[in-house]
Amino acid sequence: MNKKVIRNVVVFIVVVILSGWIGVLVDSVLTEQPKGESLGMGIWLVLPMLTAIAITIF
């Protein structure tokens, strides 16, 4: 495999894992949120998508 592909996959995996933990951290700080529509869940869903777009551009 190409080194660029491996780098992009590793970056994506790291961002996906970190986005989940960032979402948990945000949800623990902001306690007054709806059960299924929290800001942490939004971060967890949107950040990997934005990372995939950024990796595709670069």
Image (cartoon, grey):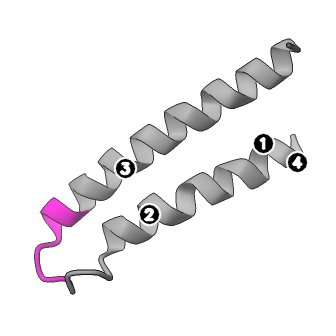
- Per the image, the residue denoted by label 3 is 20
Rendered location of residue 49, percent (x, y):
64, 58
Above/below status of 37 relative to 17: below
For the residues labelled 1 and 4, say whether their Cβ atoms are less than 8 Å apart: yes
Question: In what element is the residue under mark 2?
Answer: helix
Q: Quadrant of residue 5?
A: top right
Expressed as whole percent of the image width and height from the top left, the position of residue 54 reads 76, 49
Residue type at mark 1: give it.
Answer: Ile
Q: Which mark is first along the chain, 3 or 4? A: 3
* Residue in the image at 23% along x and 53% along y: 25
48 horizontally vs 36: left or right: right
Specify which label sits upstream in the sequence, 2 or 4. Answer: 2
Task: Give the magenta range.
Answer: 27-33
Evaluate if marks 4 and 3 touch, with contact meaning CB atoms under 8 Å apart. Answer: no
Category of crowding for the residue at label 3, using alpha-carbon neighbours closer than 10 angstroms: few (below 14), some (14–19), many (at least 20): some
Residue displayed at 55% across by 57% down: 47
The answer to whether residue 32 is magenta is yes
What's the CA distance linking mark 1 and mark 2? Answer: 18 Å
Q: CA distance from mark 1 to mark 4?
A: 5 Å
| Disc 2 residue type (three-letter) | Ile
Q: CA distance from mark 4 to mark 3?
A: 23 Å
Circle 4 residue: 57
Element carrying mark 1: helix
Badge number at residue 43:
2
State the SS at label 3.
helix
Q: Residue at x 55, y 34 (%)?
A: 13
| Residue density around tag 1, few if under 14, some if 14–19, many if 20 or more, within 10 Å | some
Q: Are marks 2 and 4 in contact (CB under 8 Å)?
A: no
Q: Is 43 on the left or on the right of 54, as rendered?
A: left
